[in-house]
Amino acid sequence: MKKLLILLLSLSLIFGLSGCGGGTANEDFEVNVCIASEPMTIDPALNSAVDGAIMLQHSFEGLMKWVDDGEGNAIIDKGQAADYTVSDDGMVYTFTIRDDAKWSDGEAVVAGDFKYAWDRLVDPATAADYGYLVADLNATWDAPDDATFVVTLPNPCPYFLEICAFPAAYPVREDIIAEAGDQWTFSTETYIGNGPYKMSAWEHNSKITYVKNDQYYDFDNLGPATINFYLMDDANAQLAAFNDGTLNFNEGYPMEEVDALLESGQLQIGDYLGTYYVCFNTEDPIFKDVNVRKAFTLAIDRNFIINEITKTGEFPASGFVPSGISDAEGPSGDDFRTVGGDYIKTSEDDYAANVAEAKAALAEAGYPDGKGFPTVEYVYNTDDRHRAIAEALQNMWQEQLGVKVTIANEEWGTFLETRKNGDYQIARNGWISDFNDPISFLDMWTTGSGNNDAQYKNADYDKLIADVKSSTDNEARMTKMHEAEDILVGDYVVGPIYFYVQPYMVQGIDNWYYTPLGFFFFGYTTPADM
């Protein structure tokens, strides 16, 4: 299975569904999708969630973008860049902006828009979670004229073009943000993008409506006149909306319906490069002890969760970096996880030994059989699946460790703030790769990183990641990333539970496509019966 995954997912492979071709003459054609509830933000620099990224990829566009190749696959291709060149040493990228690149208000997109956006992304005052994505490259960038954007890297970066297609690297308008401030994303008057669609309405906690951007260079080939992003967190309501034909695409469903949905074929499963895990606040007085974190991690029965709760083909997580991520120096057919091996034994026969080790760790921390251990809290965002997993974890920790854990749920946007600010003890978490390189799972845990929800600090770890990013030797990069994962998992910063798959439901549309990075694209869809 791992060999199959690496073949399917290597570098820029993406699955898609192709039908009768791009575009539709039906101006009444709408696509209705539900990928999450109210987004925390739809500011390209500030978003750090997959749902926000999907919305952003319809309303903005980077120098590069993911495109359907017409044969069911998608690849990185030029977006707002008409062309680009790379120096012989692989360190200077020169992008030429398209002559017909326009903002949705008709203004021309210029290279300075990218410079402003990248400067804003790395500015500490912006407090962007993904500021490190560009800052850690130690690159410089400039716009010598309106048509030219030049990025100079200190070392070759094998995933740089994928960064250029990532939402955090999208351009934004300095004049609009200067005038509207942090409110610019909430009004259709100021939410000006350069992508294929533009926001026409935002009914909070109900739906965000996007319509075709008539200034987009490929406007004539776009599909639906309208894309409605329904904002729902109730699994029963989501399934009901799909079953009554309101939704064309849906990711939410009640857990008790999984078996029936799989049997009927309504629920489909795609590949997904990500890890579902619990995150420990390493600055919390209780969870600052590595032995406590170790105990909570090893007491998790991963097979019970994937076999009895999720039931959609997930893999028990034996490390943090999932299967499917390339290890360029691994033997043919191997990936980073295969080369790195298993940190956590995940067979059903190993669980008793894991629990014994967990109990020993908790005793080492001063709480034999859980005696004297204070009540702690696990927090998750409102969702049927997360609730079921939270209840299972609560029971496992009680039964195996003798500790009491309360559980609490929060609305999605609030939950993201809680986790980011470190206002928790244990939290549900998940990470989907931003590009197909192990560093996407490892650089987030450096001291001060915007996505370091664990508040983790380790100077040796920081140095390894810095060395990875300054290395010109790919074999050395991979070696140091394995060493970094040794530290991360050995410090039990996170408790990996399973490697993701992508369950989804779709009806009535063709020509949508998606990446195992979690991005779905609906801009070129057509009615399924065309």
Image (spheres, rainbow, N blue to C red):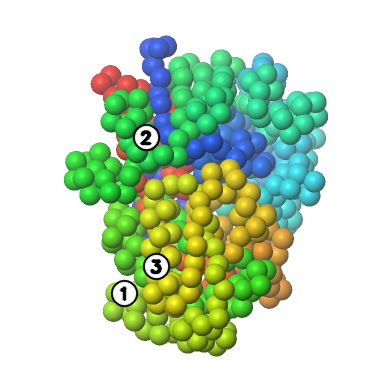
Quarter occupied by the N terminus: bottom left
Nearer the camera: disc 1 or disc 2: 2
Identify the residue under disc 3: 395
Q: Which mark is residue 488?
A: none
Residue at image location 40% in from the left, 24% down from the top: 31
Q: Nearer the viewer, residue 219 or 77?
A: 219
Relative to residue 219, is residue 92 depicted above or below? below
Q: Earlier in the sequence, mark 1 or mark 2?
A: 2
Residue at image location 29% in from the left, 55% down from the top: 311
Disc 2 residue type? Ala
Disc 3 residue type? Asn
Query: Residue 39: percent from the left, percent from the top?
Result: 56, 38
Secondary element under disc 1, as helix, strand or loop, is loop
Pointer 2 with pointer 3, Cβ within 8 A: no
Disc 1 residue type? Ser
The CA distance from mark 2 to mark 3 is 28 Å
The CA distance from mark 1 to mark 3 is 20 Å
Callout 1 crowding tier (Cα within 10 Å): few <14, some 14–19, many ≥20:
few
Identify the residue under disc 2: 237
Q: Quadrant of residue 450?
A: bottom right
Query: Residue 267: percent from the left, percent from the top?
Result: 28, 42
Nearer the camera: disc 2 or disc 3: 3
Q: Which mark is residue 347?
A: 1
Q: Earlier in the sequence, mark 2 or mark 3?
A: 2
Q: Earlier in the sequence, mark 1 or mark 3?
A: 1
Pointer 1 with pointer 2, Cβ within 8 A: no
Relative to residue 526, is residue 88 depicted above or below? below
Residue at image location 52% in from the left, 26% down from the top: 208
Residue 226 visible to an observer of this rendering: yes
Residue at image location 28% in from the left, 19% down from the top: 530
Secondary element under disc 3, as helix, strand or loop, is helix
